[in-house]
Amino acid sequence: MYSKKVIQHFQKPHNQGVIKNPDAIGQVGNPACGDIMKIYLKIKDKTIKDIKFETMGCAAAIAVSSVFTDLIKNKTLTEALKVDNKKIVEELGGLPAQKIHCSMLAIEAFKNAVDNYQGKACSCEKFCKTCNRECAS
Amino acid sequence: MQQEKNKKIYLDHSATTPVDKKVLVTMLPYFSDKFGNPSSVHSFGQEAMTGVDVAREKVAEFLDCSVSEIVFTSGATEADNLAIFGIIKALKRKNPNDKFHIITSSIEHPAVLELFKVLQEQGFEVQFLPVKANGTVDIEDFKQAIKDNTVFVSIMYVNSEVGSIQPIHEIGKWIQKINKLRLKKWQETEPKNRGDKPFAIYFHTDATQAVNFLNCSTKHLHVDLLSLSGHKIYGPKGVGALFVKSDVLIDAIQLGGHHENNRRSGTLNVSGIVGLGEAIKLLDKKTTEKNNKKIDKLRRLLIAGITKNIPNVILNTDLNQSVPSHAHFSFIGAEGEAILISLDLVGVAVSTGSACASSSLQASSVLLAMGINEEVSHSSIRFTLGKNTTETEIKKVITILQPIIKRLRQMSPK
């Protein structure tokens, strides 16, 4: 069902944990949907210097969190915002059809963190449309 | 010892069971040696038919009914389809203008639930009974649900997710009482005023998850129709049976031959049927009692170990009202599928609910019907033990599980 890459990231996720005194935090999802992701950022000169995540979710959600944080680490915010879910799925060697929506989890959590950093309103409403839920954050 | 150490552990017996060696041996001659078509008149055909006849006797004996009341099918799903659509088709054919009320529970297998939804769309009045917190239908709710135009009831014997046993005997008895009352009332009315003979309520149960453990005498249960499956009872996949009481009229759903007394067309799956017969033969009362005791003891060991080792665990199976195989847990703060995959990676097979529902992302409708919230139901794991499960396996699972839950919880946002 899952690719080797997904299982590797699920078993030994990269960038998993918490950043103390982060410059930005983003969170999306809802325990009622079965998935929540929280992302912590250290930002300097508009560049992501450090990133950590905490995820409660299925194996795909955890693998997505791991690979996405790898993909955007050391990128500028503008570059990082261009990383789409296709890229994540590709990096993971594919995801089962019913798990594709998990790849959006990380992207929306990151967008939420950037919005918070830039002082904008929460954008997570958009993500939560995928499971027709009010966002918990 | 090394081999024992690395052996995979299977705790998903509610999804399917391995074919018992005795069953396999009984089946094997029916592939290449006794290969005839049982519908053929020549000796090859008759040899195959003998195998089917023996199996039919075994199934009939187990269900406490006559051989003519057994219809072999491709499995329990087909048996459910034949029972429900077959009854409704016959009723509609004879009474096209009547408005019927039919009852089921909200925790049925999709092979029942989806059919009732289709019938609802077709204009039937359908009632989905709620369940109590332990996953059982309340007999009082059931009694209240019956209306004058109720003609059909389908309630599963054992729920596949949490293992809860439904009060089939009590429901069956009550239906019998209602049927007698309807008839009596009609008989006591003057012939010119009473109209047509009243409809009887027919009662179907999907006993797929019960056969291994419970008394399935159709007379004791007072059922008119009962579905079962081969692969849940250490028999082969692709074979099942439907009991249809002799006085119950069903129309065939699958046409194109005259097999099974015109009730189910299609060349008989001889080796499968022979296997089903042998599997059911192995379920004699004494063996069942022995296995039930053994499995229940191991289940209690598993539950005690898990609840002792892991905090924040909810047991969703009611031990006093369930088959001995099931232990259904919610591990708050860890997602069910992540637990399943983690266990699978170390050789332990479990399920997050029913295997049929595993590709859907929705929280289990069974757990929601039990009043369990979505967050808790997403954290669920179903362990189902079997007759070959060992104490060593259970102890190993208890040890393996604790760090898995801990790791997943540590990764969750606080």
Image (tube, coloured by chain):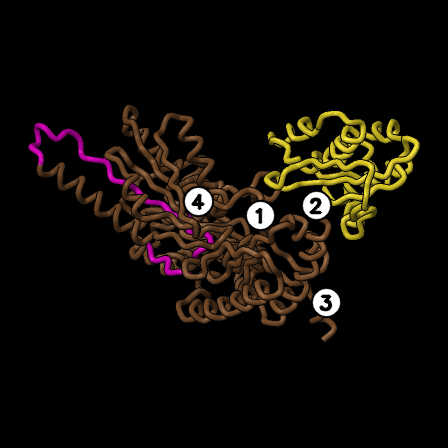
Chain colours: A yellow, B brown
The mark closer to the camera, 2 or 1, is 2
Give how far across and how far down residue B358 sits, in percent: 60, 44
Mark 3 vs 4, N-terminal side: 3
Q: Which residue is mark 4?
A: B79
The mark closer to the camera, 1 or 4, is 1
Mark 2 vs 1, N-terminal side: 1
Between B200 and A84, which is closer to the camera in this rendering? A84
Q: Which residue is mark 3?
A: B6
Between B268 and B406, which is closer to the camera in this rendering? B406
Q: Which mark is residue A90?
A: none
User: Are the residues tagged 2 and 4 within 8 Å (C-beta)?
Assistant: no
Q: Mark 2 vs mark 3: tell me if same chain.
A: yes
User: Are the residues tagged 1 and 3 within 8 Å (C-beta)?
Assistant: no
Q: CA distance from mark 2 to mark 3?
A: 34 Å
Q: Which residue is mark 2?
A: B413
Q: Which mark is residue B355?
A: 1
Q: Residue furthest bottom?
A: B1
